[in-house]
Amino acid sequence: MSFRFVIELRDEDLDYFRRVFDERRRPGTGVQISVEQVAESAERLIAEARGRNAPPFILEKLEQLRPLVAMITDAEWQLPEPEVARVLNTLAWFADPADLIPDDLPVLGYLDDALMVDILVGNLEPEFEAFQDFCRFREAESQRRLDAGEDRPDVSRTDWLDARRRELHSRMRLRRQP
């Protein structure tokens, strides 16, 4: 038998979590973290949650950390530095051992992490959507070119990816503006 539990947070509740995040991520208050450290921390968090049999809805949320990490590690995406810093700053939350709810608390230990994933992914929505569009384009265009036998030396993978990347980076910045 399963049990469904729905949490609805009001704007003031979400504001609280955003304030907690902002206070803990304020520049100069934390340790600098590298892309590699962030990637390792995200994978470790997901593995630990799986090892502790976290509920599927928690694991589903934590899995969203992987595409966030990919946004800053994908060599073909080449996310501009200001956006890399935004994503790194966001992911650093999950590298911090101080949690609102201790992870070793059965069933609920990763609830705060799952909640923060939702909030923080929402904050990175323009970047996240642009990266997902780029990945879909890259896969579809690679397959289309393969199927059509378009291995032309005058148009490289780098050329067609550069054009799409520039377009998506521009769209991402426009959507970020208030």
Image (cartoon, helix red, strand yellow):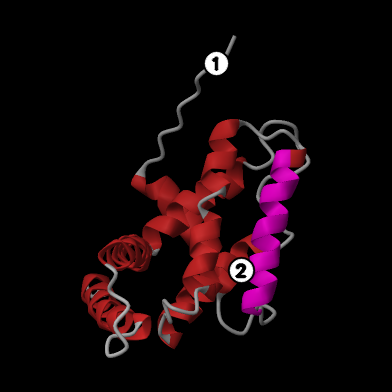
**Which region of the structure is painted magenta?**
34-50
The residue closer to the viewer here, 64 or 29, is: 64
Which residue is most to the top?
1
In the picture, the disc for residue 168 is none
Q: Amino acid at mark 2?
A: Ala
In terms of depth relative to the viewer, which is nearer, 27 or 152?
Answer: 152
The circle on residue 3 is 1
Relative to 34, say whether 49 is above or below. Answer: above
Residue at image coords 42%, 50%: 14
For the N terminus, the quadrant is: top right
Reply above or below: 53 against 95.
above
Which residue does the image show at 54% across and 57% down from the upper left?
65
Asked whether 44 falls inside the magenta stretch, the response is: yes
Q: Which residue is mark 2?
A: 92
Q: Please report the residue visible at 50 percent of the width from the left and 23 percent of the height from the top.
A: 5
Task: Name the chief secondary structure element in magenta.
Answer: helix
Q: Position of residue 87 (x, y in %)?
A: 49, 71
Give SS at disc 1.
loop
Q: Quadrant of the C terminus?
A: bottom left
Quarter of the image for residue 15 reads bottom left
Mark 1 or mark 2: whose residue is earlier in sequence: 1
Relative placement, left or right, of 110 versus 162 is right
* Residue 156 x %, y %: 33, 85
Judging from the image, what secondary structure is the residue with disc 2 in? helix
Question: Which is nearer the eye, 9 or 57?
Answer: 57
